[in-house]
Image (cartoon, rainbow, N blue to C red):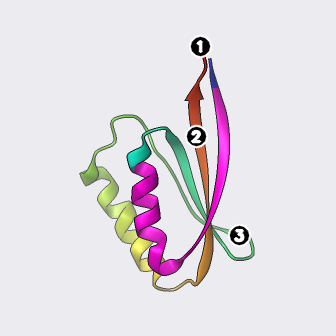
Amino acid sequence: MATNAKDYFTTTGENLVNKVKELIKEGNVRKVTILDHEGKELMSFPLTIGVVGTVLAPVLAAIGAMAALIGECSIKVERTDKVV
């Protein structure tokens, strides 16, 4: 059985790509949603086990382009934690 946990992080546009890369490396992230300072969803993408860098490259490029246009934003992270 698995439980889903949600975490929120606040960051600036210039740090957005690095934070998303860091979250992807953690491995237990199921979905990442980027929200503007008012809480409006700007971008959302699922992560699955076995996703490789070449698949994520276009997503990270889009995040980088968006980061140049926004100031402060929030990242909502949905995690899957396996419970025995």
Callout 3: helix, strand or loop? loop
Residue range of the region highlighted in magenta in the rendering:
3-24
In the rendered image, the residue lying farthest to the right is 38
Picture layout, residue 4 above or below residue 15: above
Q: Position of residue 49 (x, y in %)?
A: 39, 34
Q: Quadrant for residue 50, please give it.
A: top left
Q: In the drawing, what numbered circle is on residue 51?
A: none
Callout 2: helix, strand or loop? strand
In the rendered image, the residue lying farthest to the left is 54
Check disc 3 and give the amino acid type.
Answer: Lys
Q: CA distance from mark 2 to mark 3?
A: 20 Å
Q: Nearer the viewer, mark 2 or mark 3?
A: 2
| Badge 1 or badge 3: first in the primary sequence | 3
| Mark 1 lies on residue | 84
Callout 1: helix, strand or loop? loop
Picture layout, residue 38 above or below residue 52: below
Q: In the drawing, what numbered circle is on residue 79?
A: 2
Given residues 6 and 43, the one toward you in this image is 6
State the quadrant of the N terminus: top right
Q: Residue at x 42, y 50 (%)?
A: 24
Q: Is residue 60 left or right of residue 77?
A: left
Q: Residue at x 75, y 75 (%)?
A: 38
Label 3, residues with CA under 10 Å away: few <14, some 14-19, many ≥20: few
Q: Is residue 69 magenta?
A: no
